[in-house]
Image (cartoon, grey):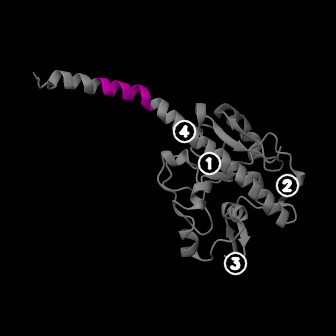
Amino acid sequence: MRINQKFTLIEMLIVIAIIGVLLTILLPSLNKARKASRTASTISNLKQMYQGTVSYTVSNDGNIFLTSTNYHVRQDDKTTNWTRMVFEEIIGELLPGGTKGARRQMKKGTTYYSLMYCPVLRMTRPGGKQHPQGRSDFGMNRHFRDAYRKIAQLEGKKEPFIMPATRPGDSHALPDLNHAEYNPSSKTHPIYEYNNSKSVALFIDGNIRFISISEGAALETAVNRRSDFK
């Protein structure tokens, strides 16, 4: 004899409650794994930025681009951000001149966007707006704001060279450590949203490591003193 069995309302509520408890337990682990994967992508991006930097210096008598603005042959002016310069070195070709062509190759889903916008920060922020001058989630140390520096003359074992620096609350990425501070009480300090509330930093010798908020605060004086780069 076949008996039709149906869930009662109470049984169904119990099942839903159990599923809710399991999701509550598993979601933090899944989010942590997701962030760890994206952090690994960020580190990979920084390594490529370093290779692009070295390539740029080889082509420019050992000099590093400026964190402020640079001359670009296709823009025919001195308003191009370092992020476009280093990306072009990485891919081995120039982006189109003008506004429409450059924006098209920098929008979400492109190689530029995947490389120059941090995967971790993009988890919680709107899509970055593109500009032919170049934009990114990464900022370069303000030491490089004014005068061109030769990479062979730099040590930089203490101060970071490049870090994620998009300001919290920005609707688009317009970061620049040229305008940021390491003081954690400032709204423009580098982003500490990676593993264990740390930031990730690229140093001038190619080394990449995590920096805590307290270490960032301790670096503020050194970074603000643009006369040297330790």
- What amino acid type is highlighted by mark number 3? Asp
Instruction: Give me the disc on residue 35.
Output: 4
* Residue holding disc 3: 76
Tell me which segment is drawn in magenta: 18-27
* Residue 212 relative to residue 114: left or right: right
Instruction: Give me the disc on residue 173.
Output: none
**Quadrant in the rendering for residue 220:** top right
- What amino acid type is highlighted by mark number 2? Ile
Mark 4: secondary structure? helix
Mark 1: secondary structure? loop
Can residue 145 be seen in the rendering of this structure? no
* Residue 172 relative to residue 70: left or right: left
- Sequence-first disc among 4 and 3: 4
- What amino acid type is highlighted by mark number 1? Ala
* Residue 77 relative to residue 157: left or right: left
- Sequence-first disc among 1 and 2: 2
